[in-house]
């Protein structure tokens, strides 16, 4: 029997905004000596931490496979040990946590399809022990910010790498020099064969399997039940679609933008009392004041003559506001579920003061951390941001070059504005957004965005 080929993959990903400008880093090491055999890093545009971490894992496993051209066999002939400081990725790929988020499922499937699952093991490590991959990810994000492409020759990541403990010896480590040469050749081939900046490509026919066991970090992890049987595998085809670059790393302006005119719905009876009113409550109708606001908005947009399409949240207050404008403009209304308001859980219908009195600790945690949901199973701001960003991408592609009225709520509008500005999640609490106010964001074909207006209520006076 031939000696086992044993490699260590360390991977990481980060997002400056979550979602925001993101990148990943990965390094492949000789398991016995700790020698660096390959590095990979890439700026991937706007994405969440979770997506960037999974992209780092995919790059690391693909780099490891490139070092093992005959790595089709499993068992003792091949051992790849993955070390990451993402508890989410480690637990999901190990099968102990369930993958619920739709953006994570295809990424996990791509990672699982690269090497035989029986040959790959996963270990969570503290962030301090993942400095090499962390530095690579930050170098990639810095390069994207500056409009450059990350280059391995300029990397200083290994200077920050901590001392590593080799895996227990189970055979000769092999020829590290030859392995490094293979890695360099694989990297060069990948670069020359791709114009997207991706160092490694995954087979487009990779099978997508929903891994058993809680969820990505945008949801509260479910307790691990070691006696629970894994869920059946659901296999579908997944393509390795490159993530477009944005911001300073993007190409020049690609023509007329998709312009989103963001109209907050008119008042309901809950609005002037400043009660939490999301998608998990009573779905109130417009009040008399709200209907008047919607009518005034309709007159305003009719006078402008710029709105070409109307898209609304599915909630009643938005549909009623959108209908008032659509009737005046002679347009139809398309419903987009991604534009619905946050589910505020047990806080629905309560004032801020009432929530403070009843759920003080939960409210404090919610204000401090965008990944913390409201009491009772509501949505965190991170979950809402991912949902809204997905809706934005669908609408941007559908309405390129057109002006679209999006009738929606406070949180989705603030989220669209902050994502366009690449502002942190805490900026949500510093935006004022009145009922029936107008904000405008233009999205260009190269991924750049321009916030033109925020909280305009001049049409209501």
Image (cartoon, helix red, strand yellow):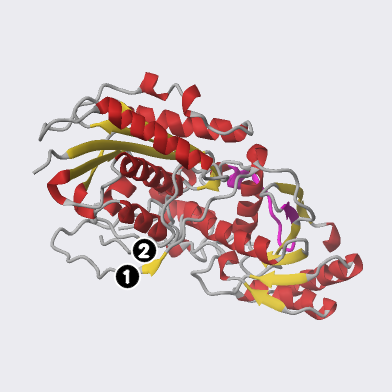
> Which residue is found at the position 49% from the left and 46% from the top?
367
Give the residue at mark 1: 234
Reply above or below: 116 against 314. above
| Quadrant location, the N terminus | top left
Position of 217 with respect to 386 (left or right) is left
**Residue 23 x, y percent position in the rendering:** 49, 39
- The furthest residue to the right: 303
Q: Is residue 290 magenta?
A: no
User: Does the rendering let one see residue 375?
Assistant: no
Give the residue at mark 2: 208
Q: Residues within 10 Å of mark 1 (few under 14, many from 20)?
A: few
> Which residue is found at the position 37% from the left and 55% from the top?
110
**Residue 61 x, y percent position in the rendering:** 33, 44
| Quadrant location, the C terminus | bottom right
Q: Which residues are magenta?
A: 427-444
Contact flag, marks 1 and 2 (Cβ < 8 Å)? yes
Measured Cα–Cα span from mark 1 to mark 2: 7 Å
Position of 293 with respect to 115 (left or right) is right
Position of 64 with respect to 435 (left or right) is left
Question: Which structural element holds mark 1?
Answer: loop
User: Does the rendering let one see residue 228?
Assistant: yes
- The front one of 36 and 17 is 36
Q: Earlier in the sequence, mark 1 or mark 2?
A: 2
Q: Is residue 430 magenta?
A: yes
Reply above or below: 274 against 42. below
All told, the count of numbered labels is 2
Question: Which structural element holds mark 2?
Answer: strand
- The front one of 193 and 370 is 193
């Amino acid at each position: 029997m031939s000696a086992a080929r044993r490699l260590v993959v360390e991977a990481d990903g980060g997002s400056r905004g979550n979602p925001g400008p993101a990148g990943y880093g990965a390094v492949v090491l000789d398991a016995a000596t700790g020698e660096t055999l390959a590095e990979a890093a890439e700026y991937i545009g706007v994405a969440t931490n979770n997506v960037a971490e999974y992209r780092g894992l995919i790059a690391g496993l693909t780099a490891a496979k490139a070092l093992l051209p005959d790595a089709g066999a499993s068992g003792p002939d091949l051992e790849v040990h993955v070390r990451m400081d993402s508890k989410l990725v480690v637990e999901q790929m190990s099968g102990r946590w369930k993958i619920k988020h739709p953006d994570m499922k295809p990424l996990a499937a791509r990672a699982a399809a690269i090497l035989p699952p029986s040959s790959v093991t996963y270990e969570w490590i503290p962030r301090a022990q993942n400095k090499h991959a962390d530095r690579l990810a930050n170098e990639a994000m810095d390069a994207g910010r500056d409009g450059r492409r990350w280059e391995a020759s300029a990397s200083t990541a290994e200077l920050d790498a901590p001392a590593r403990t080799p895996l227990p010896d189970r055979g000769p480590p092999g020829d590290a020099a030859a392995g490094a040469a293979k890695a360099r050749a694989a990297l060069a081939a990948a670069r020359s064969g791709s114009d997207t900046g991706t160092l490694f490509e995954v087979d487009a026919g990779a099978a997508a399997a929903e891994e058993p066991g809680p969820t990505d970090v945008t949801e509260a992890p479910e307790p691990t039940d070691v006696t629970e049987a894994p869920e059946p595998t659901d296999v579908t085809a997944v393509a390795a679609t490159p993530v477009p670059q944005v911001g300073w790393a993007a190409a020049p302006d690609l023509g007329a933008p998709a312009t989103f005119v963001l109209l907050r719905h008119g008042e309901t009876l809950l609005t002037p009392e400043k009660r939490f009113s999301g998608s998990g409550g009573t779905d109130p109708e417009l009040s008399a004041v709200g209907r008047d606001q919607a009518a005034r908005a309709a007159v305003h947009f009719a006078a402008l003559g710029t709105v070409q399409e109307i898209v609304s949240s599915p909630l009643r207050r938005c549909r009623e506001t959108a209908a008032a404008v659509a009737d005046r403009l002679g347009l139809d209304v398309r419903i987009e579920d991604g534009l619905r308001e946050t589910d505020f859980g047990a806080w629905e219908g309560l004032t801020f003061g009432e929530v403070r009195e009843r759920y003080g600790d939960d409210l404090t945690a919610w204000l401090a951390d965008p990944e913390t949901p409201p009491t009772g199973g509501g949505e965190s701001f991170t979950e809402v941001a991912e949902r809204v960003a997905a809706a934005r991408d669908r609408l941007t592609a559908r309405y390129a070059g057109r002006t679209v009225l999006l009738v929606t709520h406070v949180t989705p509008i603030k989220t669209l504005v902050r994502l366009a500005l690449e502002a942190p999640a805490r900026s949500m609490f510093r935006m004022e957004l009145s009922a029936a106010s107008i904000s405008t964001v233009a999205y260009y074909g190269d991924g750049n965005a321009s916030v033109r207006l925020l909280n305009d209520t001049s049409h209501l006076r």
